[in-house]
Image: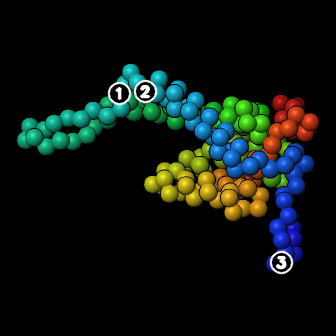
Amino acid sequence: MPSYGGPLSAYSDPAGALASPWRRLAAIIIDWVILGIVGWLITLPFGQVVEVTGPNGDQRISWHAGSFVANLLVTILTLAYFTILHGKFGQTVGKMALRTRVVRADGGGAISYGAALLRIVVMYVLWAICCVGGIVDSVWLLGDHRRQTLHDKAAKTVVVRADTDAPNPYGHR
């Protein structure tokens, strides 16, 4: 750590250099496009919202029961996608495409499935706070010397470049 008032040095991680914010953004866009298509295919047959007009002409909106189950399934699938892929490989499909990887902040080792689940749950909760929490979470890495988002800080992880010549902490899984 630099001395007080001194310049910040780049965070050095045994697993490789930190991923740029642009790589992280592109990777999450790929993941959300994939999950969006899958979610759309799952919820499409059920419809999202049914609008019902009352006898006095007033309108109310009610959820279709099948839609609730479909949305719950999509949420579980999303949590499983990030938890399993991050826990097993340290990479989602988007991170694989952009050659980035999630590792422990304290040495660059593989993260646990619990840490992977914590990352996505914190991200979900922050986005649920009127999207403001999610925006703050996403932008946080721009001012952080370790390029950590709030969900990275909660799970004690960093995202690094997964160069082919760098050691893979997930190789044993």
Marks 1/3: CA–CA distance = 57 Å
Is residue 30 something one can see in this rendering? yes
Q: Which residue is mark 2?
A: 43
Marks 1 and 2: in contact by CB < 8 Å? yes
Residue 3 coordinates in the image, percent (x, y): 87, 75
Q: Amino acid at mark 1?
A: Gly
Q: Secondary structure at mark 3?
A: loop
Earlier in the chain: of badge 2 and badge 3, it is 3
Marks 3 and 2: in contact by CB < 8 Å? no
Residue at x 64% of width, y 45% of height: 25
Q: Is residue 169 above or below residue 136?
A: above
Q: Is residue 102 left or right of residue 127?
A: right
Q: Amino acid at mark 3?
A: Tyr
Marks 3 and 1: in contact by CB < 8 Å? no
Residue at x 27% of width, y 32% of height: 50
Q: Which residue is mark 1?
A: 47
Mark whose residue sits in front, 2 or 3? 3
Q: Is residue 74 left or right of residue 91?
A: left
Q: Is residue 81 above or below residue 121?
A: above
Q: Is residue 15 above or below residue 80?
A: below
User: Alpha-carbon neighbours of circle 2 within 10 Å: few (<14), some, or many (≥20)?
Assistant: many
Q: Is residue 122 left or right of residue 108?
A: left
- Quadrant of the frame with the N terminus: bottom right
Q: Which residue is mark 3?
A: 4
Earlier in the chain: of badge 1 and badge 3, it is 3
